[in-house]
Amino acid sequence: MGAGHLTAVGAVDLIVTNLAAIQVTPAGLLLKELAHGVSPEYVQSLTEPVLIPAADLREMELQELRGRGHNIRWQYPAPLRAPASALPSEPS
């Protein structure tokens, strides 16, 4: 594989990030979903290949996962949090 390749050609059919969901099609990259408050133009500005906005382009939905005693709510975009070890300690 050449530089910049993450996987084999044809092995990926859907790309999901904190900003968008993009379907890989024979015609190109189809922009299917956007995070709340994110524009297609913004995603395109961060993406080298040309994105094709889907006719049914929509906002990503939040999903709640339940099981094994955990409730997880996915948020888009995900908030950034520094690990506790990276935070300055309070003066004593």
Image (spheres, rainbow, N blue to C red):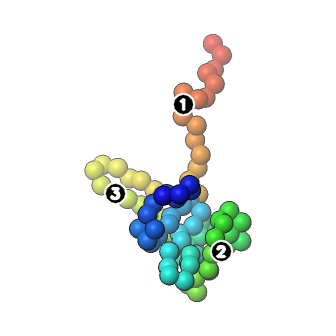
Point 28% across, 50% down: residue: 68
Q: Is residue 83 above or below residue 48?
A: above
Q: Nearer the viewer, mark 1 or mark 2?
A: 2
Q: Report crowding for label 3: few under 14, some 14 to 19, many 20 or more residues within 10 A (C-alpha).
A: few
Rendered-image quadrant of the C terminus: top right
User: In the rendering, at what x and y percent does residue 24 appear?
Assistant: 50, 74
Closer to us: 52 or 38: 52
**Residue flagged by tag 1: what amino acid is it?**
Ala
Q: Is residue 86 above or below residue 80?
A: above
Q: Provide the residue designation for mark 1.
A: 84
Camera sees residue 53: yes
Q: Is residue 92 above or below residue 67?
A: above
Point 38% across, 59% down: residue: 65
**SS type, badge 2:** loop
Camera sees residue 39: no
**Residue flagged by tag 2: what amino acid is it?**
Val
Q: Provide the residue designation for mark 3.
A: 66
**SS type, badge 1:** helix
**Residue flagged by tag 3: what amino acid is it?**
Arg
Q: Is residue 92 above or below residue 75?
A: above
Q: Are marks 1 and 2 in contact (CB under 8 Å)?
A: no
